[in-house]
Image (tube, rainbow, N blue to C red):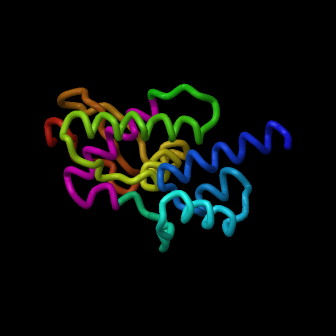
Amino acid sequence: MSLNTLNRYALAVELLSLDARISIVAKETGLSPAILRKAFVDMHQRSPSSGSMRTSPLFMCKSFSKLKESTLCAVFFRLENHQHCARRVINGYRRYRSYINSVSNTDPLLDFSEAWVISTWLEIEVVKLVRCSHCRSAKLINNELQHNVCSVCRT
């Protein structure tokens, strides 16, 4: 087995351990969705999530808490400097999850697949991470709504 093949399988296991959607893992690794579903069931003792992925950035704005955590997740993604996008998303999501657990002792509002979508949108500039004009904190905006509420000063 080549090193490239081993790296693909290792990435698949890592993504599956984070509860990534099968479609994300298949796209990133090139492995068969049937094999990935079986591996997910073996790993988690349950079926993987089904249904469609988020297609509109408006899901981040459903609640103020969700927007705040989406912004935080985007900041952690931007802090990563690894060349491989999948590695940046994984590391950024782990930092985000660890931060939320340590600060609030609760589970994060975003799952890995949502964080993946936000990171993808950041890369293709569907959403942008900008500075708030009032308090200068990070602010996540989308192209549909150029004026999203700041998570810190709420302006």
How far across and down, in percent of the image, does residue 1 sit? 85, 43
Q: Is residue 149 above or below residue 95?
A: below
Q: Which residues are the magenta region?
A: 59-78
Report whether 73 appears left or right of 66. right
The C terminus - image quarter: top left
Q: Residue at x 19, y 52 (%)?
A: 64
How far across and down, in percent of the image, does residue 134 sit? 18, 30
Q: Residue furthest right?
A: 1
Predominant secondary structure, magenta span: helix
How far across and down, in percent of the image, does residue 128 sit? 42, 42
Q: Residue at x 60, y 49 (%)?
A: 13
How far across and down, in percent of the image, does residue 24 sit? 59, 57
Q: Residue at x 15, y 42 (%)?
A: 154
Of 64 and 84, nearer the camera is: 84
Of 67 and 149, nearer the camera is: 67
Q: Does 61 appear in magenta? A: yes
Numbered circles on residues, count: 0
Q: Does 18 appear in magenta? A: no
Q: Residue furthest bottom?
A: 51
Of 104 and 24, nearer the camera is: 104
Report whether 136 appears left or right of 33. left
Q: Residue at x 36, y 38 (%)?
A: 96
